[in-house]
Amino acid sequence: MKILKFGGTSVGSVENLRRVKDILISDQENKIVVCSAMSGVTDQLVSLVENIKLEDAEAITRNIHRLESKHTDVIDELVESTEIKNVLKDGLTLLITELFEIANQEYSEIVNSQIITYGETLLTYIFSGFLKSLQIENVLLDAKDFMHVGTAENPDILEVSRRINKMFEEGVQSSIYITQGFVCRNLEGDISHLKRGGSDYTATIIGAAVNASEIQIWTDIDGLHNNDPRYVEETQPIAHLTYNEAAELAYFGAKILHPQTVSPVVDKEIPVLLKNTFDPEASGTIISNKTYRKGLKAISAKDGITAIKIKSNRMLMAHGYLRRIFEVFDNYHTSIDMITTSEIAISLTIDNISNLDEIVREIETYAEVTVEQNHSIICIVGESVINDRNSYKLFEILNYIPVRMVSYGGSNNNISLLVDTKDKIPTLRFLNEKLFHVPHEIVV
Ligand code: ASP
Ligand code: MG
């Protein structure tokens, strides 16, 4: 069994939905197909949640009608038979009625999750019907019936597995199952979600649950690139990445993958392929446990980072000082990404500033605290990158750009720099030039 996940752009137009259909029928193996919402739809649903918070009935109606007509147009263009078209439109009307009912409730976390995951419900319903209209047999599974993950941080794969297998045993058999990404249920059994971009994570959770032979993540680019193609010209797709490398890149900003994507499949060693819906023949990126080449692979950048410097003479030769500082962050459930220390000061970074004021207030009772926002972590990744003979060249950046922190040697696979976000693009370009535009001689 393979898992194929299609992102927002891949299902974002009638033309692209037809491409997805072609990809599905080009491979005979049994598959579970995980779909995102059409591109732009989740953003619109997020704004619908804002309308609900403001109890703006007119905006709610306008917003839902817009979604309805967008999806009605898709049915009209996609499906040929008038009879099937009408059946599908009747079903869509029911789904839209249900959406109105949810939107008429008072705002709560559950309402939020129900609304923002609705784009996946609408799209999978239409796509499954479209395939049926072409006699491509498939079964639409409701992800809410089996994605009982408990917590998104540590999904209960066994429970998901038990539920999927039960559905397979009791339900109609098919070689193609279609389901929704992004939505899940929490420990209470309430509808929840896997955070924005979470359909990738759905695919690997399901893959681990059914012991898939392979997971394919179909997007609009030919795999993970060695630098951010939005800011740097002439980036190259990377053919192979290890799970470690992919996890670091996804966590540190590579937009193509949800940060937690690979974690469910690492132990089971299920390969994850990143493929391009618009160029299915391109080989894309294969993420697996195999190291084909050590050394420098890619650079990514994560924005929205806050640097905190904590300085105190009491730190000099004292033990237990770091524990005291880390405890404060722990008490406020705030995780720390980068750390550098000197004898009397420590600098660290966080990306969640919701408890920043409290944290600073507490530490200020015994140390001097300086906070600097709007920073970016630039992450240079590759198995054994610190042993790559070319990696020293990245330090030439110090001649040109004020680097706020450097983290080297924390792991063999990652070197991180902290820069002001206004210097992010020049940093990415500089590093690209220095590290990738050289005959790559790697000695590890
Ligand atoms: N539709 C959701 C989003 O836009 C989930 C996903 O596409 O992965 O974030
Ligand atoms: Mg995505």
Image (spheres, rainbow, N blue to C red):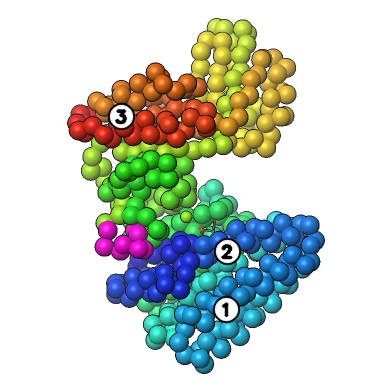
The front one of 105 and 11 is 11
The amino acid sitting under disc 3 is Lys
Rate crowding at label 1 as few (under 14), some (14 to 19) or many (20 or more) other CA atoms within 10 Å: some
Rate crowding at label 2 as few (under 14), some (14 to 19) or many (20 or more) other CA atoms within 10 Å: many
Q: Position of residue 397 (x, y in %)?
A: 38, 23
Q: Are marks 3 and 2 in contact (CB under 8 Å)?
A: no
Magenta stretch bounds: 274-282
Is the magenta region chiefly helix, strand or loop?
loop
Distance between the Cα atoms at labels 3 and 1? 51 Å
Is the C-beta of the residue carrying label 1 under 8 Å from the nearest atom of ligand 1? no
Q: Secondary structure at mark 1?
A: helix
Residue that numbered label 3 is attached to: 434
Q: Secondary structure at mark 2?
A: helix
Q: Position of residue 123 (x, y in %)?
A: 53, 71
The amino acid sitting under disc 1 is Thr
Q: Position of residue 204 (x, y in %)?
A: 43, 57
Residue 72 is labelled as 1
Residue that numbered label 2 is attached to: 41
Is the C-beta of the residue carrying label 2 under 8 Å from the nearest atom of ligand 1? yes
Instruction: Indicate left or right for 272 with 182 as reference.
Output: left
Residue 372 sits inside the magenta stretch: no
Q: Position of residue 59 (x, y in %)?
A: 74, 65
Distance between the Cα atoms at labels 3 and 2? 40 Å
Q: Is residue 240 above or below residue 361?
A: below
The residue located at (56%, 74%) in the rendering is: 71
